[in-house]
Amino acid sequence: MHESYSLNWDDLKYFLAVARSGTIRGGASNIRVNHTTLARRIEVLEERVGSRLFDRSKAGLVLTQLGEDLLPYAQKVEEEMHAASRVIVGRDAEPRGTIYVSMPHGLAMTSIMDDLSAFSHQYPEIELNLTFSNSIADLTRREADVSLRVSSEVTQDVVGRKLVQMSQAAYCSRRYAEQITDNEGEGLQFIGWHEAEEAVTAPWLQSSFYPKATLRHRVSELVPLITLAASGLGMAYLACNLGDRHPDLIRAPFQKPLPYRSLWLLLHRDLRNTARVRLFVDFLATRISARKNEFWVAGTVTL
Amino acid sequence: MHESYSLNWDDLKYFLAVARSGTIRGGASNIRVNHTTLARRIEVLEERVGSRLFDRSKAGLVLTQLGEDLLPYAQKVEEEMHAASRVIVGRDAEPRGTIYVSMPHGLAMTSIMDDLSAFSHQYPEIELNLTFSNSIADLTRREADVSLRVSSEVTQDVVGRKLVQMSQAAYCSRRYAEQITDNEGEGLQFIGWHEAEEAVTAPWLQSSFYPKATLRHRVSELVPLITLAASGLGMAYLACNLGDRHPDLIRAPFQKPLPYRSLWLLLHRDLRNTARVRLFVDFLATRISARKNEFWVAGTVTL
DNA sequence: CTTTGATGGTTCATTTTTGAAACACAGCGT
DNA sequence: ACGCTGTGTTTCAAAAATGAACCATCAAAG
């Protein structure tokens, strides 16, 4: 570890500020810090250097010989930092680079995949890194730049954008639908989730249009739920944008769609001005909003 | 104020550490910080840059494309800092530059001036900046690199070095001394300092060999005290190294020297390894110690 | 299969840094 | 002489950073 590591490299900003303005307050004003802070940072720097960098006189602070010797190095460091900043700013301003996107598994089977495909087609310089997970991506920990969530509300310290409200309905295969009559679900079976094994019903089933139906079987993921319902094992409650899209599923008769959750688009506030992220977010929001009736369907019960 | 000022330039150390080692703990160990600190600094840097600089994988932390783009700039900043450090270290290692020395007025008339002259003669590359003041130079505020003080003890947060113990005695002109008899100072007058106008004596006078002497006249500085005593106005109590050196002053008869204070050499702990300061301190201490009987004279009363 | 060591991450107490307010001083203008 | 402005310095409370202890996970070795 080198001698230079005992110096705080950031102190060069303060050194340069005083060297250029000749006063503590002037320098502080120029770099937007409190003048006390600037005075202290110079003091600490001088201690670590082991010599004065400025002589204090009535005329202000004047560079010592050592201060003058070090000035060119500080200026070169600043130039490098400016150049690095141009790389950063330039990169952000250009719509290129990678966007890390996180979303729940269920959205993998929706039309939103078409949106991602269209975005990538339109912006070939931007690469999408997709993560499917039911756990909430921690944006502050940079697990993702953008996160799509299906939720009633968001509580994270992120910039949230509600895209659409969703509907849900009961779905089954065409064959299963043939046995359905207008009898509040008597004799029908819904595939359950995490309900207890011995439970034959659940609150969401009791408040549906099939309160007499029972729970049978359990799944822990969305994909098997859809696949099993489509093959006739039972009925499933699904978001409409998902169920309506599946070729082997129909909405069960004798019901109306119910309100479901909302689709949110979340991103960390620090990234909202990055060109590619802004592009992606706007692109997605525009397309999804344009077909909101795919998510919130006609006839959905309103409370 | 430039975009680069929103970045903490010191974070480059952390960036380079992770880029080189590929792990948080490895990088932290290399630059001697806690690994948590390193992780957090990288996190903050990524937030300010607005993009990831490292991808986290099982293999460790791998530079992103932006990380790779920025690496050369970070390396150049480091090189400049190393070069600046060489200037600093090289300067300190060589006995050249300025030493700021502070001392009380009284020492300006002593043989210590000869010491400074000899030092400057022997080390012409070193410049001395001398400040004479009775107020204590604040070493932590860099008012001086080295401070000579006459004091019983030192309380400042500095590296203190007691050079010699001093004696004091009553001095007067040769003419004035002709009237002095062995009568405990009856009819003698001492020039006073800050004692009240109406006061005719003081504790230091009462405990001297001339308790019957009285105070007459006042001075607020040492130079006029010496000058007036030398011209016969009255007697003066002076440090022996000062009184013995004056051509027109002699020690008054019928007394013994009394203990006075000590001569201290103080410096701020951060400067003690600077070559020129170390040279100066050692030079001064050696010469003054070699003639300690000029300060603590023979016959001084011991308590 | 179990143990060990290395890894990144979380939590909490302590230390350090920062900003704001107040102060002292000098210079200038009225 | 007085008031104003700009300067650097001091003090204190709040915010930020740091380090230490602990945790969970994984891979390698026994």
Image (spheres, coloured by chain):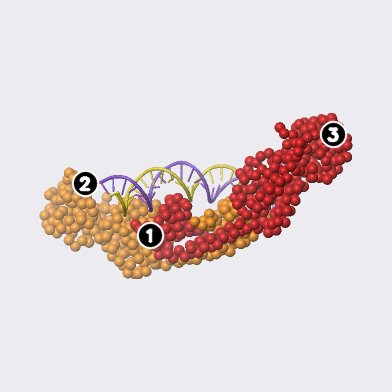
Chain colours: A red, B orange, C yellow, D purple
Q: Which mark is residue B60?
A: none
Which of label 2 and label 1 is nearer to you? 1
In the drawing, does residue A144 fall left or right of residue A213?
left
Q: Residue at x 63, y 41 (%)?
A: A155
Question: Separation of disc 2 and disc 1 at Cα?
Answer: 39 Å
SS of the residue at dot 3?
loop
- Residue highlighted by disc 1: A55
| On-image quarter of the N terminus of chain A | bottom right
| Mark 1 closeness class: few <14, some 14–19, many ≥20 residues within 10 Å | some
Q: Residue B68 location in percent, x, y?
A: 62, 61
Question: Separation of disc 3 and disc 1 at Cα?
Answer: 90 Å
Chain of the residue where label 1 is placed in the rendered structure: A
Q: Residue B296 location in percent, x, y?
A: 27, 57
Give whichever of D18, A92 is nearer the camera: A92
- Residue highlighted by disc 3: A188
| Mark 3 closeness class: few <14, some 14–19, many ≥20 residues within 10 Å | many
Give whichever of B49, B36 is nearer the camera: B49
Q: Would you place residue D6 above or below residue A300 in this image?
A: below
Q: Would you place residue A134 above or below residue B232 in this image?
A: above
